[in-house]
Each structure stands twice: as structure tokens, then as C-alpha cells.
Image: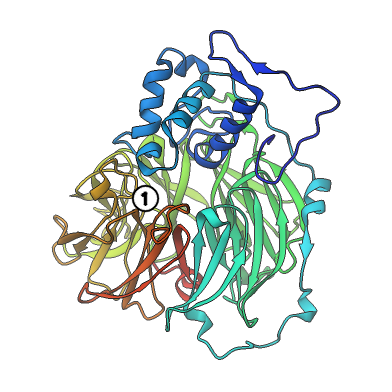
Amino acid sequence: MAGLKGETPPTGGVEATPAVELGEAPVLTTEEFEQARQIFFDRCAGCHGVLRNGATGPALTPDKTLPKGTLALASIIFNGTPRGMPDWGKQGVLTAEQAELMAKYIQNEPPAPPEMSMEQMRGFWKVLVAPEDRPTEPQHTRNWENFFAVTLRDAGQVAVIDGDTYEVVATVNTGYAVHISRMSATGRYVYTIGRDGKTALIDLWMDPPAVVAEVKTCYDARSVEVSKYNGPEGDFTDRYAIVGCYWPPHFVIVDGLTLEPLKVVSTRSYTYDTQEYHPEPRVASIVASHFSPKWVVNVKETGQIWLVDYTDVQNPAIKMLNAERFLHDGGWDASGRYFLVAANNANKIVVLDVQEEKVAAIVETEKIPHPGRGANWIDPVFGPVWSTSHLGEGALVAIGTDPVNHPEYAWKVVRTIPLPGAGSLFLKTHPNSDWIWVDHTLNPDEEIQRTVCVIAKANPVEPYKCWQVADYGRAVHFEYNMEGNQVWVSVWGRADDPGRTGEIVVYDDKTLEEIARIPNLVTPTGKFNVYNTVKDIY
């Protein structure tokens, strides 16, 4: 994409025009247009789409934005909305002038971003330490299975933190604003995917842990996963990895130990229901099946789930399942057979039976479910359930997940628990825990943004306790340590506010008392414990 971080597009000999004026849209100079385009990529494209056709957030094409006008649009951008639109101005991320600039920008036609070829990807590919030169055993005495990979969003880094001592063991450069970290099947490696499409491979056995390979396979991405199948069809443990991209809309299969790009597959296709061509079907969450050598690839805008067979990566067989539009994030049920994924702007959860390779159910929920990976727990009345919170509604729902022993509750919303407000991004629990933890990160109220709540599994009718974790920033994302007796919560501050850039607060999960703070982290967001991520514990 022209103007994306680290990218300077070729001009092709064409001189830049001094202004951009499209129809009745406000006029922007070239400098203003480029500034706005970069801000849109950094802050807006994830929800609204590179082409602004909408997904988690509404469409922002000129036919939608011009009638609203600059003043109204700037107010929304600056102040946010109760449905999950961040208050970029109140946070201090954008000034009033920048909010007005963005309001003008989205009234113009979206610029056409470039594609990316295999040749370009291979040009970005680097092996910093070859597999044969890597350690054959850990080079330190730390309990690396209790390491946390912590996204330092605005620094373009990941901190590796020791879960036993709370020490920052290493801070490594990754892609910009890492969206998730996923572990190799063995747990030794961390795969990070930045919103700039850069994948980094971190070896936790090195002292200190370090990046051993990297590749850029697109300009905007959200997902990465490894091959995990080991069975009659072969042992594919960590042999391959897959990177799911937002732009260009494709996925790329890479070598699991070197990240060498091997195969590109476009996801441009037709919507599952109206069968209309869509130019931007972005790849959302990806998980690896343990039943067969396949990845579960969720294609957002067309509403399809693709089962990608990786036994022959140059000729991958793909089974396309009709599901629901706006597929986003999700996680396994406790049995590991069913994958539940949010079709967030459709207000639904799709249940995929990975063993039978079919959609088992589609469940209606509250507005804009955003589960992260969700939370599995035992309801005292309804038995095994999986839960999600919501961006657009102050509610946490529980969906029955046991069709064998509790068929009357399976794939139904059996409980709706009220929360202090909307704007929740994540919830978390652990099999050993009495609680379900939930945040309210994107709520427009500053106090609620900093508030976390716990719901007692024994009496899940309302929050047991809610409190603010800090006097600044936003509380976001939870992760347990390896033993399941401590919970880590991020305080997402501002990179340009010394002393308030962010920290992690560690709580005793039994007593809910604060144990420690890990200070002076630059905008920490997602945290991924090695053991829990490998074992899919949530």
C-alpha cells in the first residue's frame, strides 16, 4: 500500500498532483492525503477495511460519509461511539486537527493499494540463524514454557517476559503492532504477525531469545499458525506455517523453521449468500486441526471457512464451507473438536465441527461479539459452555458446547450476563479458576476503559467484582501463567507519555489481590503464555 510503514511505492515516472479532489469531497493536498492514508492504515483499516467496505466497523465509502459531513465525522473520530469505535481524540492519539483531516479523507475515494508478488516476498525474507546453527537444547536455565510473549504495540516489538520472575528476558524487533503471537507445536518458537504483514520467528531456547527468521508476505495482516498434525498421514509438526493477510487478500504458506515463502493463495471470491464478487475478502483467524493435516482459515467478507490441506503445499486442496459474513476471531471448545468463531458484524457465532468438517450450528448473540479465543467453563446449571463478550453490547453470553451429555443446551445461548458497558475486546478463564475475567477496552467512558470485572462461575448472574487497574490508559487482554494461579492484565498507555506508556498488572487468581506490576512497557496489549498457547487453555 502506498504510504504504508517502510514502503515507498514506485512512481512510474508520473508526477504527483498537488491536490486530491474527487467529486464533492473536501480537497486535500498531497501531503495531507499521504498523512491521512498512513493514519488510516495504522488505526482504521483493521475494522473498516483497506478499501473501506466495512466489516467489524461500518463502510466508510464516500456514498456513506459525504452525507454526514466533516463536522459530524470528525466528532465521531475524536469522541468514539458506544458500539466500540475508539475515541482517538480523547485518548490523545489524534489531535482535533488530525480528526478533521481524517473526516475529510474518508469522504474521498479510497486509494487503490498495490498487490504483492512472490518475488517481492522472497526479497523481504531473511534467515538470521539457520536451523542447523540453532541450539539443540535451551541455553539458559529459565522455565521457558512459562515465558510470556507480550506485544509492545506502538514500539513494533515483542517483550519476552519470565512468568516466574516477571523479568523482561528480551525485547525483540518484530512487525508493527503485532496482532497475535502463536507458538510452534513444540513451544520452542514464537511466531509473531504484525499489522504491517511482517512475520518474525523467535527462538526461546537462545540466551537471550532472539529473532532467527523473518518475512513480509503482505502489507496488512492479522493471523499466523503452524502445522500441528501428527498421525497416519504423516508428521507435519512445525513443518509449515501459514500467514493470513488483510491486504492483499490472500494467505501464504511458508516453511515452518525458516519462513521461506512457498505458496500464495488468493481469497478473492464470491459472498456465500448472494454470490457477489468481493475484491477484499480478508483472512481473519486461523487454527490448525489435530484431526487432519489442515488449517481452518476464516475468510471474513465472503463468509466462508476454508479447510486448507497442507500435505501438498504447491497444490493445496481447499474445502470451502458456507458460514456467515464478517468472520473474525474465535477459539476451541473444551473438547478441541469444535471451533467457535465470531461473525461479529452479523452478531453471530459459527460453530465448526472440525472432525466432521461441517458447520454444526450458527448461534445469534448480542451486538458485535469479540471473544478473542473465548472462555471455556462449567456452568452450574447448563454444563460445559463457551463464552464471548461484545463490542456493541454490555453483555457476556454463554453458549452450551456439550451435544453428547447436554444436547438440550448445545449450540444455544443459555445465559446472558450483564456488564458495566460495551466495548469489550477480551475475556479469559482457566480450568483451575473460579472466575471469568472480562475487559471493557473500547468503552467510551474513561473509567470503564480501565475497568476489569470477574464473574464467579458458581453464581454467573452478574459480575462479582469490578475495579480499575490503573489511573491511566486502558485495561486490555488477560493471560494466565503456566500454573493457572495468576492473571496478567495489560495497561495500554501512550507511547508519547513518559511514565504512563503502559505496564502489566499481575493478580492472584484465587484472592484477586495484586501481586506485582511490570512497569515501563511501551503500549503492551496481547500476552501469550507459551504453555497455555500450545495447549489451547482458555
Residue that badge 1 annotates:
425
Number of disc labels: 1
Q: Tell which of 29 and 117 is nearer to you.
A: 29
- In-image side of 307 versus 398 (left or right): right
Quarter the N terminus occupies: top right
Can you tell which quarter of the image residue 73 is in?
A: top left
Q: Is residue 179 above or below residue 92?
A: below
Q: Tell which of 123 and 338 is nearer to you.
A: 123
Q: Residue at x 50, y 86 (%)?
A: 143
Looking at this view, name the residue that lies furthest to the top: 24
Q: Tell which of 54 and 127 is nearer to you.
A: 127
Can you tell which quarter of the image residue 346 is in?
A: top left
Quick check: can you spot residue 413?
no
Mark 1 residue type = Leu
Circle 1 — which element?
loop
Can you tell which quarter of the image residue 271 is in?
A: top right
**Mark 1 neighbour class, 10 Å CA radius: few under 14, some 14 to 19, many 20 or more:** many
Quick check: can you spot residue 454?
yes
Q: Residue at x 64, y 27 (%)?
A: 31
Quarter the C terminus occupies: bottom left
Q: Is residue 404 above or below residue 496?
A: below
Residue 388: x and y in percent read 32, 52
Q: Residue at x 40, y 39 (%)?
A: 88
Q: Is residue 449 above or below residue 10?
A: below
